[in-house]
Amino acid sequence: MSTKMFKLYSLPSSSWNGARSVVTRNANLAARRSSSSVGVVSTLADWKTGSRWGYSTAAAAVASLLTLSGAGAVVLCEQQANAAADEVTPSHVATEDFGVVQTSHDIETMPIYTSDQVAENNGENGTPMWMSYGGVVYDVSDFIANHPGGAEKISTAGGGAIEPFWYLYRQHFASDLPMRLMEHMAVGRLAQDDQDLVDEQMVVLEEDDPYAREPMRHHALVVHSDTPMNAEIPSPLMTKNYLTPSSLFYIRNHHPVPYMTEKQVNDYRLRVDLTAYGKGVLSLTLDDLKKMDKIEVTATLQCSGNRRSGFNDLKRTSGTPWGQGAVSTAKWGGVRLADLLELAGLKNAIEAQEKLGFEHVRFHAQDEMMASIGIEKALSPYGDVIVCYEMNGEPLPRDHGYPVRIIVPGYAAVRNVKWVDKIELAKTEAEGTWQRGLNYKTLPPSVTDAKNVNLDQMPSMTEVSLFSGITNTHVISSKHKVKPGEKVVVKASGWAWAGGGRNIVRVDITSDGGKNWATAELKEGSDQRFGRAWAWVFWECEVPAVVQTDGNIELASKAVDLAFNVQPESSDHTWNVRGLGNNSWHRTTVKASK
């Protein structure tokens, strides 16, 4: 028996401690043993309810880690190989007749491999990369470069079973896309005895659930996945308060929320590491931070994938299908990052950069996430980057970074690292998925396969673009029923925001596809300092409109910022396979009749 099959179970406890299955293990095991001739995957409904384990759940779960394509991926039949090459992409498989694809695959005709044979194909020394899940063996060699989590992360599973990872990263179960992709990558079955051993070890792994101590969440949030939690604020509530209540602030988590006992909070130390600069490590308690000069910054944070669902209208992308609600605003309180670095021993930032080559400040989180920003933003007296311990005048909630997080105003939210325990001055940007991997890099619209893309030459998302949204509408009319062709006025309201501190100078609303525009009145947030407008602006507008033949009215909004950037009409020309940065006109349908 190969030890490779079990290498993943020696992961640090902080990575998977106590991960459990999404469905009951014993029921799954029994179902598999009673199943005789099952396709590689069953229906998504069967998979979600756990009515089949065996090869059906296997394909669904492993496919979940594969959210981009590999051109020329392995298929089961030679007749399919030529047709499938260069077509196993999210946009392609989303249009397949999945029933036909399923019935073309018979698990009983596929070769059986032992765990030793799988281990021999670990992607090293020129070998292909295989991995197994739930009794099915997959060749993911052509997919490695496209893994949103980065090649390094997926390579960890090469030659072994991946069950522990996918019971931790359960967000991958939220869509049928992974299952569709993985259908094309199965190459065989794992020997039953070897899969039984994996199942037995998973029983032990399931005894403790890393998500068991998740915080309570507001019932109004629109939840896309709950383990880990990814949820947005409903559109009508977005502009109810200028500062989003902490309980309604959108949530974007990559892992279980760190849980700290009272003792652990008391023992918490934020390390400011200037070792490479020759000044050692400064260690600070939470009380130490609170004794320093406090500043407050009102800033908007937005997930880089906000409005990803709009891209999916053209071609399918990978990732959470956010609406417009993955954006919120709060007043953040804490200590200037520049003050902390100076306290730790950084005396001349310009010299540190220009003569010594220190270009980046890295942030390390308790959940092992890492990200970084350039030293210019980190130390600018006008950049307002803070080490934060308060949100809306109260201690940070656990979902939003307790006890300490970073706030980088005007930047993509992924740079605003939560649960920070180390800050580091460095010559290179942060290592890992969230800085250097595909996750937060925007590929051109024509690229669906990253195999031939040098990600090191592509910048990660930092300062963001220009956005707006319509949150509430009301048709002003004395009639209960309005007929098609009648003229009405629609009262609309919403939000707008630009990255980089660029003020919003105008918001325009159209009801006829852009032929005519009404200019909105800018409300809360319109008086922010020029060049330091870190938070959104609310707006209101009365828009003349004509009721369409279907009884509806179509509105669209576009914002203009201080640099006179304007939102593009369509997302078609900014489509990217990761679904990042959709800032096209925001459109909404209004029902004319009451």
Image (cartoon, grey):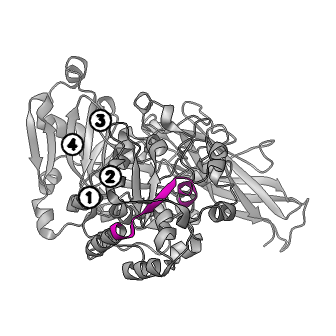
Residue 249 showing in the rendered view: no
Q: Are marks 4 and 3 in contact (CB under 8 Å)?
A: no
Residue drawn at the location 20% of the way across and 38% of the way down: 424
Looking at marks 2 and 3 on the same chain, the residue that comes earlier in the sequence is marked by 2
The answer to whether mark 1 and mark 3 are in CB contact below 8 A is: no
Q: Magenta residues, as a range?
A: 179-194
Write down the quadrant of residue 483 in the picture.
Answer: bottom right
Q: Position of residue 84 (x, y in %)?
A: 63, 46
Which residue is labeled 1 in the image?
A: 2
Q: Badge 2 local density, few (<14 within 10 Å), some, or many (20+)?
A: many
Q: Are marks 2 and 1 in contact (CB under 8 Å)?
A: yes
Residue of label 3: 378
Q: Secondary structure at mark 2?
A: helix
Q: Is residue 591 above or below residue 519?
A: below
Q: Is residue 135 visible?
A: yes
Measure the C-alpha gap from mark 2 to mark 1: 7 Å
Q: Earlier in the sequence, mark 4 or mark 3?
A: 3
**Horizontal side of residue 308 vs 264, given as left or right:** right
Sequence-first disc among 1 and 3: 1
Name the mark nearer the viewer: 4 or 3: 4
Disc marking residue 423:
4
What residue does disc 2 label? Answer: 119
- Circle nearer the N terminus (4, 2): 2
